[in-house]
Amino acid sequence: MGDMFSNLSLGFSVALSLKNLALCFTGCFVGTLIGVLPGVGPIATIAMLLPITFGLDPVGALIMLAGIYYGAQYGGSTTAILVNIPGEATSVVTTLDGHQMAKQGRAGVALGTAAIGSFIAGCAATLLIAALGAPLTKLALLFGPAEYFALMVMGLAFAVVLARGSVLKALAMIMVGLLLSTVGTDLETGQERLTFGFQPLADGIDFAVLAMGMFGFAEVLRNLESPETRDVVKGTIGRLLPGKEELRQMMPPILRGTAVGSILGILPGNGAVLGPFASYTMEKKLAKDPSRFGRGAIEGVAGPEAANNAGAQTAFIPLLTLGIPPNAVMALMVGAMTIHGIIPGPQVMTKNPDLFWGMIASMWIGNLMLLIINLPLVGLWVKLLKVPYRLMYPAILIFCCIGIYSINNQPMDVAFTALFGLFGYLLIKLGFEPAPLLLGFVLGKLMEEKLRQALIISRGSFMTFVERPISAGLLVVAVIVLVIAVLPAMSKKRDEVFTE
Amino acid sequence: MSQMSDGGGGLRIRSPQDMGAGIFMIVLGVAALILGSNLSMGTLRSIGPGMLPKSLAVICMAIGLLLCVNSLRFGGPALESWSWKGILLVLGGACLFGLVIRGFQIGPISVPSLGLVAAGPLVVLVSGMAADDRKVRQLFIFAAVMTIGCALLFKYALGLPIPLAPWLLGI
């Protein structure tokens, strides 16, 4: 316990430096700014803003990226409440009651509730990360290649099950992601693989190129097709701060949501998406009058928003301690860290304690900043929401183009990104949801490395994965999860959850 | 192609989208197998460079096959049409950006490095034409504003080495 506080104080000494505070603030601000735009989810936001962190030192860059991430998350909720367009899966639930509240002239209270709920959840999640960071890192050091491989298999199994749409198609996306990750020079033999003999591909497919193509460009193409129906709340926003009665009403849901969201977020699969759904269902079941839900119940905003933010933060735990990203957004963070020369994993905490704890401390500061900057700036967000898409997407494109070009100062990369945009568009047209692909792509290289190591150690016997208890346990969980998901009864329920 | 016919209860494609997805996965798997045909599999004891790509390719093909079979059994959405205008203008605009920012030379055609001053408006204008509700005058003004904004942000505030207009300003 004492350790945790000395670590946290080291973290705060890093995060509270004037420069890092400014970076955290800028990150939160621009993250919200872009995240608020309808049709731009957190993945696209982070991919687009990645280049503005290039010139910074790793600590500053990561603090800023984390800020961008929270900002994008929070921006998504704002859009959900004001426009009824969820920026991503996790804010779907917020549209149910949040937008109703807004229609009743209580938009301000809904936004305030979301902000307060997120802040409380953020505080709890930060403490949880600080408490679990050290022990989990020690656990990670006990993991051999076989366990790592099994853990990643389990993570991917969860990602398949928790993805939207067909299980088979999600599995297909993971496999395509893994396959794409093998493109490039083989690390052990130096042989070129699947490169068409094309020189720029020898280093493999650039992560940022893939992400911006599939989530920036392809998303623009998708949005251009569906005519916009943006139902921005007219009328007044109303007061922002909830009254005493409302505070009393929202506190229990916030605390319950925080607990549910934190636990689900730690799962090394995309557990965080389940948080808001679970919290909403729970609040509805616990409520004295469930019929209020869907008609502007404050509990229906407070609980899911807290769960959303808690999950968004605890999702950092598997990334920071084990080096395994649990979802597509965290996969993007891995890509960003690698660009700055940091390989996420247990060694980060021991080798760069100032980075590790500085980032954790900045998470709390980021949450506080969101609370402070968002409420007074609601007017600005509302104005942004009125920017028509015909101007929004050219702006997104020029940003992406400059960003991709500046990664390697390589004009060719822009053309590659366009190619991946086309690829992403094709996938969307075929009914695939591309997010799991990104996860598979990021995990691919690490998985191959661990698989090879494990098999060298075991002298070519696959039994090693079953004989070692931890790895066997993880694989069993993976199989169970997949089997349950394909069972007809469960897949029906799963559909209900995602359509609700 | 007899499967294509609308033969009532018999074998027919009930979900064209899934059939397309299945064919896509199979094509991808076959392509990976062909491209990786020269890579050695190695043994389990020391895995060669071809082991993973080839196994993944086979898995992709298996999933593709399953998707195809399922598309015959269960109903599903039709294939959507493509909006070529969007693809051409949006992706084309991005490619133009890549071509002119530092210049290029392909065979007899060569373009000098035009920098952000040309590439910026180009990508905004070309891609902006893809919107159904485009307003050309507004777009021109927007292109100028965005280019200036981006130049200030990326070149000066963030210090990234982007050529602005080497032919005009020398930077």
Image (cartoon, coloured by chain):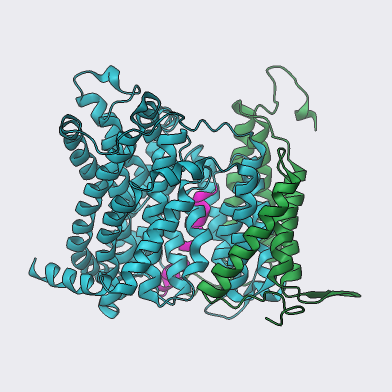
Chain colours: A cyan, B green
Q: Nearer the viewer, residue B111 or A30?
A: A30
Residue A148 in sight: yes
Residues in magenta, as a range: A434-458
The reply, left or right, for residue A121 in relation to residue A409 is: left
Q: Which residue sits at x=47%, y=34%?
A: A83
B96 shown above or below A36: below
A490 shown above or below B106: above
Magenta-drawn stretch contains A436 = yes
Residue A464 in sight: no
Quarter where residue A495 is shown:
top left
Specify the farthest residue to the right: B108
Q: Nearer the viewer, residue A473 or A27?
A: A27
Magenta-drawn stretch contains A411 = no
Quadrant placement of the N terminus of chain A: bottom left
Horizontal and vertical percent for residue A2? Answer: 8, 69
The reply, left or right, for residue B37 in relation to residue A340 is: right
Horizontal and vertical percent for residue B105? Answer: 83, 76
Judged by its main secondary structure, the magenta piece is helix
Horizontal and vertical percent for residue A385? Answer: 50, 41
A399 shown above or below B43: above
Q: Nearer the viewer, residue A452 or A36?
A: A36
Quarter where residue A302 is shown:
top left
The reply, left or right, for residue B57 in relation to residue A128 is: right
The reply, left or right, for residue A63 in relation to residue A290 is: right
Specify the farthest residue to the left: A2
Q: Which residue sits at x=75%, y=19%?
A: B7
Horizontal and vertical percent for residue A351? Answer: 29, 80
Quadrant placement of the C terminus of chain A: top left
Q: Which residue sits at x=73%, y=36%?
A: B81
